[in-house]
Image (cartoon, rainbow, N blue to C red):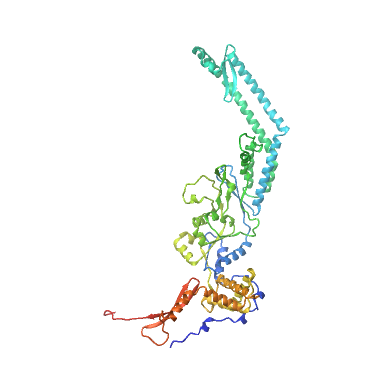
């Protein structure tokens, strides 16, 4: 015989007297993640193991606290880890299109940038002072005087030979010109053309002979001029080196223990010595706008700047980064451009980091749905994890498009643990459809939607409510309200022996109850406020249920609840409409007929 169901047996009411405290005001805040022992165990394993490919996929329904749990656990892990390095980009003096990346101890990136800025300012003051000194002028004059005497003697010897051959020597930008002398007067080129042919032929013959005779002497003059230029260059090099030598030595000593920084300082010094003139000031040019002249004065010094892309000075332990908008450029960085006088330009100072760079040496959290929604981001992340490098590139280059010429920053080596947060469905999809996924995310942390309803967990439920009201400055819940929320937790779990771990839904219920408590001018959230919040939540969503019940009452849907019918029983179907589900009675009928023989 069919036994009737007693609804009270399946409700599993929670007596307010079981609540340890009179209200959440007397409870201790929750300091742990509840109901997710399996997921936390997997997370700890994934975060501890350092081998390649053991990144973590955190799977769970929305509202189970998966994101908060991951962030909380990562914060705990990160504090026990060493601080990550700062990263800077500097000018590559051998190839300006490939800026160099340099790692420095945490907090020293900004310090290095300021030291380099101060160093260049001091050099810009020291070099003009050195080259305007009397000592420099004296050494320069002494260097050039002997060479000038030799040059003057050679020029006099050339003039003497030229006069003997009937020519005069004239200096020009292209060298020495031999001009014929006729009747004691130099003959310009225009008049020379009009002379009789035999006269011109005779003059040209004598000039060729003179040029042949003077070629060796002219070579000596050129050698002297070259020696003079080299002597001045060497003198300038020595003076500049003396002027900045101590500054360079101090800077190198300060960063002696940092790999690649002393080498960069040497490269800066060599470039300064090769470009002394820009430190001595460019002459004012007429007809050029003042703003352009100001740009021209400062532009040559940009290559000495330091671009700090990762600064961990304020980070305790390893960095933890949650990228909420994982576009390709937000994830992998970008190269900005600026317009200068109508032209797009860029350089290493416009390199901007992505979240992979900021999380390097630590942990990166990504919502997998946002990641897959952003074009190129998933492929970019996989490439970075497979190669172990963070490469900053234009999105168009990855798509194979022809792009404008730009810089190609040196890749930064990655030491990072990535945690994806998403649903079990997306995990299954990626596992089956993307071969790279199972090689890069070998750890799955599964968040459950329910936990056992025992004394320990109900107490933790109450502690969670204590946390919630304190963090959001809500009214405290009295004992009856706490018990009603626990009952609601079992209702969400659809099991009287379980409690739901969809804490986001539970938190929304408390927020709504707080609203109704405020409407009653109550100091606390009472049981009736929680009940009202549940009822109002149902009322906002149960329009279809009421329409079906009305149709049954009016006989539009025929449901018989008394007597017997052959081939007919009543069934119950469950209909879900978004955040609300309800039962609908349905008539189930059966019919039979004569079939073929043997059936």
- Number of labels in the image equals 0
Residue 448 position, x and y percent, is: 53, 71
Q: Residue at x 62, y 20 (%)?
A: 155
- In front of the other: 12 or 518: 518
Can the viewer see residue 449 in this picture?
A: yes
Can the viewer see residue 44 in this picture?
A: no
Residue 112 position, x and y percent, is: 66, 49
- In front of the other: 344 or 80: 344
Tell me if residue 559 comes above or below residue 175 in the rendering: below
- In front of the other: 504 or 524: 524
Q: Residue furthest right?
A: 134
Q: Is residue 553 left or right of residue 279?
A: left
* Quarter in which the C terminus is drawn: bottom left
Q: Is residue 102 left or right of residue 128?
A: left
Residue 279 position, x and y percent, is: 66, 38
User: Image quadrant of residue 124?
Assistant: top right
- In front of the other: 561 or 60: 561
* Quarter in which the N terminus is drawn: bottom left
Q: Residue furthest left?
A: 597
């Amino acid at each position: 015989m069919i036994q009737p169901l007693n609804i009270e047996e399946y409700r599993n009411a929670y007596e307010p007297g079981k609540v340890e405290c009179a209200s959440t005001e007397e409870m201790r805040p929750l300091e742990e993640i509840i109901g997710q022992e399996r997921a936390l165990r997997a997370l700890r394993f994934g975060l501890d193991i350092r081998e390649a490919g053991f990144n973590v996929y955190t799977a769970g329904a929305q509202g189970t606290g998966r994101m908060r749990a991951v962030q909380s656990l990562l914060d705990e892990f990160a504090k026990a880890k060493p601080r990550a390095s700062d990263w800077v980009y500097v000018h590559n003096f051998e190839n300006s299109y490939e800026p160099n990346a340099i790692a420095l101890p945490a907090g020293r990136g900004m310090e290095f940038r300021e030291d380099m800025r101060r160093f260049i300012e001091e050099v810009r003051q020291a070099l003009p002072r050195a080259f305007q000194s009397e000592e420099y002028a004296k050494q320069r004059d002494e260097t050039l005087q002997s060479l000038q005497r030799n040059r003057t003697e050679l020029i006099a010897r050339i003039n003497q030979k030229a006069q003997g051959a009937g020519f005069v020597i004239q200096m020009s930008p292209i060298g020495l010109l031999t001009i014929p002398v006729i009747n004691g007067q130099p003959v310009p080129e225009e008049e020379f053309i009009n002379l009789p042919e035999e006269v011109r032929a005779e003059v040209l013959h004598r000039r060729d002979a003179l040029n042949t005779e003077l070629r060796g002497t002219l070579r000596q003059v050129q050698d002297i001029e070259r020696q003079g230029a080299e002597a001045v260059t060497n003198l300038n090099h020595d003076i500049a080196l003396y002027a900045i030598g101590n500054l360079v030595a101090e800077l190198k000593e300060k960063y002696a223990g940092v790999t690649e920084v002393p080498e960069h300082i040497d490269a800066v010094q060599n470039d300064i010595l090769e470009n002394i003139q820009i430190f001595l000031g460019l002459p004012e040019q007429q007809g050029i706008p003042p703003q352009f002249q100001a740009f021209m004065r400062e532009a040559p010094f940009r290559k000495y700047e330091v671009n700090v892309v990762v600064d961990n000075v304020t980070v305790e332990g390893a960095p933890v980064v949650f990228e909420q908008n994982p576009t390709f450029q937000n994830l992998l960085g970008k190269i900005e451009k600026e317009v200068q006088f109508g032209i797009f330009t860029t350089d290493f100072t416009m390199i901007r980091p992505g979240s992979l760079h900021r999380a390097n040496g630590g942990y990166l959290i990504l919502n997998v749905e946002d990641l897959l929604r952003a074009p190129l981001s998933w492929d970019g992340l996989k490439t970075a994890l497979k190669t172990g490098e963070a490469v900053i590139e234009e999105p168009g280059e990855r798509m194979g498009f022809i792009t404008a010429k730009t810089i190609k920053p040196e890749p930064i080596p990655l030491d990072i643990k990535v945690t994806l947060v998403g649903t079990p469905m997306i995990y299954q999809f990626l596992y089956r459809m993307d071969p790279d996924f199972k090689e890069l995310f070998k750890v799955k942390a599964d968040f459950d939607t329910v936990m056992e309803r025992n004394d320990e967990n109900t107490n933790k439920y109450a502690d969670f409510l204590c946390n919630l009201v304190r963090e959001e400055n809500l009214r405290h819940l009295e004992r009856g309200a706490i018990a009603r929320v626990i009952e609601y937790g079992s209702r969400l779990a659809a099991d009287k022996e379980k409690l739901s771990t969809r804490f986001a839904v539970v938190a929304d219920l408390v927020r709504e109850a707080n609203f109704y408590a405020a409407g009653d001018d109550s100091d606390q959230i009472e049981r009736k406020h929680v009940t009202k919040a549940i009822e109002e939540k149902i009322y906002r969503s149960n329009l279809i249920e009421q329409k079906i019940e009305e149709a049954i009452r009016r006989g539009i849907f025929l449901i018989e609840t008394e007597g017997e019918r052959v081939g007919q029983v009543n069934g119950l179907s469950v209909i879900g409409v978004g955040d609300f589900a309800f039962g609908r009675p349905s008539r189930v009928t059966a019919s039979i007929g004569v079939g073929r023989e043997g059936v």
